[in-house]
Image (cartoon, rainbow, N blue to C red):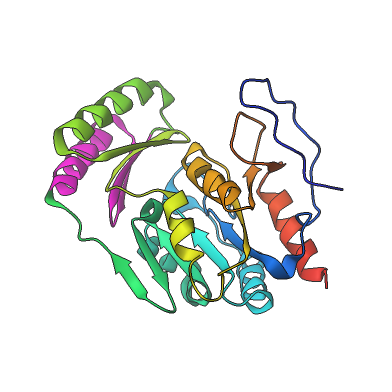
Amino acid sequence: MMLAERQPATEVLAPPPVVLDPPPVALDTVSLFFDFDGTLVDLAATPDAVVVDQRLRDALDSLAERYPGRVAIISGRSIEQLDAMLGDHARRFAVAGSHGAERRTPEDGHIAAERPASLEAAAEEFAAFAAANGLVYEAKSLGAGLHYRMAPAFEPDAVALAETLADRHGLTLQRGKMMVELRTPGDKGAALRSLIDAPTMAGTTPYFFGDDVTDEDGFEAARDLGGAGVLIGDARPTAATYRLNDVAALRDWIAAILETR
């Protein structure tokens, strides 16, 4: 069964069936890039409630062994957050955090900009707003998140505050699933383009797996480089070429390619 093709963004997308087959290319020529939240792990009410189970840790280790140097995580979380959740497993592959504003590779080590004072000032206002209204503030190395999943009525106020602070402090405003984030510049597409220049990935075909609008840059970059994006979740207009229904379907997809030889 082939992965379901994307419909034009101007059309109403019909949900294709669950797809468990590997991409229709030779896997030995592919590099795999994964978003984290909503892709490798299910979303939770708060960022720190996300569960990383042993099955995922084992799968990541197996991918690193099967495709050495050709697996990466590109996340909106900071590298520090990913390390805290994945432990030593996160050091077995390339990682780009903070929407690509920082990255760590075996060749270059950890490269990141300094946290600007403007972000610190905006983060303080985000934190105060969250505390006053029962929302969740998420501190990141190069960003600050405001989550309203548990209080969706505050979405207009949260977005308005983020827009004001982004303009005032010259920060990038990033919307996600039931959250808004202020951060330093960076995008997942640029991160993918940077990582695929590594000697172990050079000349391979990129596949980027993600669930959110924050992953669209990654889908576009993978497509432009001759690969494809794979949307995890419900059908919607997207630059992704393929789709899997949910995190569980991606876990099964990974298990299937690990069994393929």
On the image, the x and y values in percent for residue 243 come to 70, 42
Q: Which one is in front, 182 or 32?
A: 32
Q: Is residue 45 above or below residue 196?
A: above
Q: Is residue 180 left or right of residue 118?
A: right
The answer to whether any part of residue 38 appears in the image is no
Q: Is residue 43 left or right of residue 75?
A: right
The answer to whether any part of residue 54 appears in the image is yes
Inspect the magenta stretch and tell me whether residue 126 lies in it.
yes
Q: Is residue 14 above or below residue 205?
A: above
Inspect the magenta stretch and tell me whether residue 164 lies in it.
no
Q: Is residue 110 above or below residue 247?
A: below
On the image, the x and y values in percent for residue 228 come to 64, 49
- Numbered range of the magenta stretch: 118-147
On the image, the x and y values in percent for residue 125 come to 18, 37
Q: Quadrant of the C terminus?
A: bottom right
Q: Is residue 192 left or right of residue 239?
A: left
Q: Quadrant of residue 170?
A: top left
Q: Which one is in front, 176 or 21?
A: 21
